[in-house]
Image (cartoon, rainbow, N blue to C red):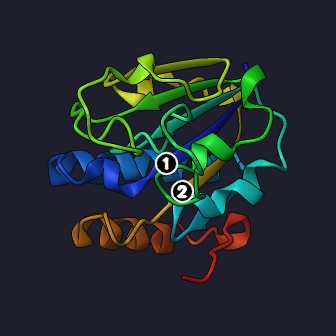
Amino acid sequence: MKTYLSIDLDYWNEQSHARAVDDLDYLIDEICGRELPFKVVFDHEKLLSHLRQFDFRRLINVDFHSDVANIDTCSELQLNCGTWVNFVPHCRSREYLWVHPGSLAFGRCDQRTNVRFPDIYTGWGDVEETNKDWRKLLDWKDVVAVGISLSPDFTAEQVLADFIVKLHAYGRFKYVVVDSP
């Protein structure tokens, strides 16, 4: 199934440094080795223009936060880093999979409640969440593009530094576009 992969670096905030480094190496090797188009943005909602360029059936979001709100409880939903998933076009005919590191404390971005994440109305055709290893969930041959959010307001400085060092070390910048803050 054609998949757009969205990554927020804050996913690794509570992971060990070794795990973060290993995952970031793997991510960059796969993206650059497969010559996949990808975009790096400061804030997650800035990926919308990028993902609109691709035909995909499933959005996988590897992130500490779900970045989706319950549209039944929001009178006027504003686009931001915590609601951008609600603004993906044609979401009624698509699947959304949120891959989180294990904590559901930030499952919903419209309010903090103990309502299970899939039991909210998002407008998506199918919504799921998991804390399984994101690398094992992916079939890279189905990935059409990758979007990466630095999220400097939420991401640990060490994770940001590791990512930037790894990207520079690879030296494959023709696939990268970084927005302005």
First-in-chain label (1 vs 2): 1
Instruction: Pinpoint residue 35: horizontal percent, then vertical percent.
Output: 72, 50
Above-or-below relation of 82 to 156: above
Residue at 25% of width from left, 72% of height from top?
A: 157
Check disc 1 and report its element: helix, strand or loop.
strand
- Extreme residue in the front direction: 75
Residue 148 tag number: 2
Instruction: Pinpoint residue 153: horizontal percent, then vertical percent.
Output: 34, 71
73 displayed left or right of 24? right
Q: Residues within 10 Å of mark 1 (few under 14, many from 20)?
A: many
Instruction: Pinpoint residue 156: horizontal percent, then vertical percent.
Output: 24, 66
Check if mark 1's residue and mark 2's residue have beta carbons within 8 Å. Answer: yes
Residue at 31% of width from left, 64% of height from top?
A: 154
Residue at 57% of width from left, 68% of height from top?
A: 41
Above-or-below relation of 90 to 177: above
Which residue carries the number 1 mark?
7
